[in-house]
Image: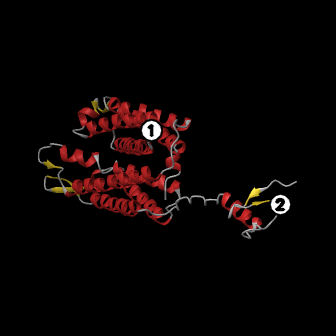
């Protein structure tokens, strides 16, 4: 025996029939429509952002290439004037000038490659590291020449000022890339990965060691704090800043920009220690500071930035 029910259209009580005897409604068709409305429509999956060049990329990458070009141009301009002569960076440096040329070519090549292959995260990461390393050539050295007070010798020449202009362009490019990374990076976990944790700890140790190592003798019993006018202070402050950023990366691992900033400052510090030590050795310096910087600080920082690069999801999957 069928259970009577009311027609949804007119309310007439009906039994096991297909059509309503009063209004003629087709119960089978109505049931199919109701079932179709009950089944939720599958929502299309959100499309992942296509790897490509963003506005900040189109600004920062050419800016970095221009900064590298100005850095190379500054090296051939006068840096020292005195006794009726002017000397360029290439005439003053022993090996640092050649390393500068290699760094400039590396930055230009990687930035150009990133404009062509924006979705390759490894290229982006290495390019940012190279830009940060190039800043080490054109920041503390020209400031040191400008700040030195030597009778009859002037370091306030076109080379230093153009080098500082190049440094400003390179730093601006890095800041724009950090903004881009913070806006588009994948969400970071609440707890840093083990490799990332070890890497930032190494950077946190290497940072405070910088001003301490400068207390050692560079050559003939003269420490870096005595030999330099302003470069020693800047290196000490940057070392402390590196330690601060590394600790912040541990405390707030979800802030990907902090981790990336520690990575970039670590790359700067590693380059500064390596290049400075090699230049000092080429100039004949044999003090403890030279060897400790070359054999301890530089490898310690290099291990730190390498582990941060491997352990940070935001750096390994940098947006294209």
**Residue corresponding to mark 2:** 16
- Spot occupied by residue 104 in the image (x, y as percentages of width and height): 38, 58
- Looking at the image, which is closer to me, 208 or 243? 243
Mark 2 or 1, nearer chain start? 2
Front residue of 271 and 131:
131
Picture quarter containing residue 89?
A: bottom left
In x, y percent, where is residue 276?
A: 35, 43
| Residue at 46% over, 32% down | 201
Of tags 2 and 1, the one toward the viewer is 2
Residue farthest to the bottom, as pictured: 24
In the picture, measured across the screen, residue 121 lies left or right of residue 11, that is left
Q: Secondary structure at mark 2?
A: loop
- The relative height of residue 291 versus residue 274 in the rendered view (above or below) is above
Would you say residue 291 is visible in this rendering? no
Q: Is residue 275 above or below residue 124?
A: above
The Cα–Cα distance between marks 2 and 1, rounded to whole angstroms, is 83 Å
Spot occupied by residue 225 in the image (x, y as percentages of width and height): 26, 33
Where residue 167 is drawn, which disc sits there? none
Q: Are marks 2 and 1 in contact (CB under 8 Å)?
A: no
- Residue under label 1, please give it: 301
Secondary structure of residue under mark 1: helix
Does residue 290 sit above or below 107 in this rendering?
above
Residue at point 33%, 50% (across, down): 137
Q: Position of residue 32 (x, y in %)?
A: 73, 64
Find residue 71 and report its image quarter: bottom left
Nearest the eye: 222 or 262: 262
């Amino acid at each position: 025996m069928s259970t009577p029910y009311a027609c949804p259209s007119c309310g007439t009580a009906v039994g096991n029939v297909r059509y309503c005897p009063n209004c003629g409604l087709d119960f089978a068709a109505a049931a199919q429509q109701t079932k179709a409305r009950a089944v939720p429509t599958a929502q299309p999956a959100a499309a992942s952002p296509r790897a490509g060049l963003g506005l900040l990329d189109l600004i920062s990458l050419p800016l970095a290439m221009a900064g590298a070009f100005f850095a190379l141009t500054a090296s051939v301009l006068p840096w020292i004037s005195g006794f009726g002569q002017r000397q360029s960076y290439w005439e003053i440096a022993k090996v640092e000038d050649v390393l500068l040329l290699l760094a400039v070519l590396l930055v230009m090549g990687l930035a150009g490659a990133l404009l062509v292959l924006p979705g390759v995260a490894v290229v982006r990461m290495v390019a940012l590291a190279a830009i940060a390393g190039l800043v080490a050539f054109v920041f503390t050295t020209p400031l040191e020449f400008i700040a030195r007070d030597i009778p009859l010798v002037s370091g306030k020449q076109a080379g230093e000022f153009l080098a500082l202009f190049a440094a400003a362009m390179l730093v601006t490019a890095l800041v724009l890339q950090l903004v881009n990374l913070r806006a588009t990076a994948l969400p970071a976990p609440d707890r840093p990965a083990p490799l990332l944790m070890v890497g930032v700890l190494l950077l946190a140790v290497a940072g405070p060691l910088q001003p301490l190592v400068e207390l050692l003798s560079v050559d003939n019993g003269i420490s870096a704090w005595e030999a330099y006018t302003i470069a020693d202070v800047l290196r000490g402050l940057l070392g402390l800043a590196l330690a601060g950023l590394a600790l912040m990366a541990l405390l707030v691992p979800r802030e990907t920009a902090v981790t990336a900033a520690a990575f970039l400052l670590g790359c700067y510090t590693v380059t500064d220690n390596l290049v400075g030590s090699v230049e000092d050795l080429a100039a004949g310096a044999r003090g403890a500071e030279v060897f400790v910087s070359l054999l301890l600080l530089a490898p310690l920082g290099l291990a730190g930035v390498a582990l941060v690069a491997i352990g940070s999801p935001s750096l390994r999957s940098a947006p294209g």
